[in-house]
Amino acid sequence: SKPVIKSAANEIREGRFCKRCGEKLEYRFYHYSQLGDYYCPKCGFARPKPDFDAEDVKVGDQLSFCVEGKHIVANYKGFYNVYNILAAYAGVRTAGFAGEHFGDMLRRFNPENGRMEQFRIKGTGVTLNLAKNPAGFNQNISAVMQDQAPKDIIIAINDNAQDGIDISWLWDVDFDLLGNDSVKSITVSGIRCQDMRLRLKYVDIPSVLEGDVEKAIRDRVEDGVGNLYVLVNYTALFSTRNILKRLEGEK
Ligand SMILES: [Zn+2]
């Protein structure tokens, strides 16, 4: 493997200490969260040698990589999905199957759960994705920015009980990465849209305030660039997905 995403100095790192002796782990390379090629300088604890290794990884509008000489292409975005797909492949192979239809299976699979789920509304391609913690949100932002085409973004943040009512984690997300010419607009929505707007203001990124998620989506479908990302936290996911399903069905 080669490093695809270099460590950002302020990136969140879970499990950064050796689980055997408590020493701080070192990384030969680092992907995100705790993932990468780690080792303990004190006791020798280290990343096990992987049985299945993704090589020649490419991320962009879709993902591709090679494993065991097979070329895998998936209509997904987000570097982290290389890990997910490789884990599924490893499961298939470890269970004793050859995995010769793995590529066909990937092509036919539509997640339908708000994880990079695609919708088409009046000519606008809409991608819905869940982001409920800083590590997930940073991966989400990387995935969105891998798409270099002009885009509009809606961020909906709720603070219902299932979300955890403390939304201070928003300050741990690297929102400054959204300050890019390809981002044509950012609309903040959901119950805590004001907090989200303040968070963006602190990294000098202007945003449109629209607390009503449906109105936010309708507005950007109407006046946007035809490529819309909707990033939501947990309790905003199902309501937003229902809205997108309904709008997709409207003529
Ligand atoms: Zn150790």
Image: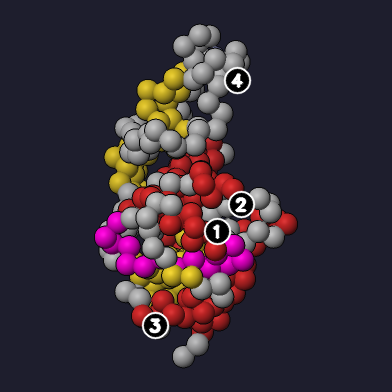
Which quarter of the image is occupied by the N terminus?
Answer: top left
Q: Which mark is residue 19?
A: 4
Q: Which residue is mark 3?
A: 222
Residue at screen point 55% across, 22% down:
17
Helix, strand or loop at mark 4: loop
Q: Is residue 103 visible?
A: no
Q: Is residue 41 left or right of residue 22?
A: left
Residue at screen point 32% across, 32% down:
2
Label 4 CB less than 8 angstroms from ligand 1: yes
Cβ atoms under marks 1 and 2 closer than 8 Å: yes
**Which of the two discs, 4 and 3, labels the residue nearer the N terminus?**
4
Instruction: State the extent of the magenta-drawn residues as a range.
Output: 180-193
Cβ atoms under marks 4 and 1 closer than 8 Å: no
Q: CA distance from mark 1 to mark 3?
A: 26 Å
Cβ atoms under marks 2 and 4 closer than 8 Å: no
Q: CA distance from mark 4 to mark 3?
A: 52 Å
Q: What amino acid is at disc 3?
A: Glu
**Which of the two discs, 4 and 1, labels the residue nearer the N terminus?**
4
Q: Nearer the viewer, residue 119 or 152?
A: 152
Helix, strand or loop at mark 2: loop
Residue at screen point 49% across, 36% down:
12
Q: Which residue is mark 2?
A: 167
Q: CA distance from mark 4 to mark 1?
A: 36 Å
Q: Nearer the viewer, residue 248 or 233?
A: 233
Single out the mark in the foreground, 4 or 1. Answer: 1
| Label 3 crowd bin: few (<14), some (14–19), many (20+), radius 10 Å | some
Residue 170 location in percent, x, y? 53, 50
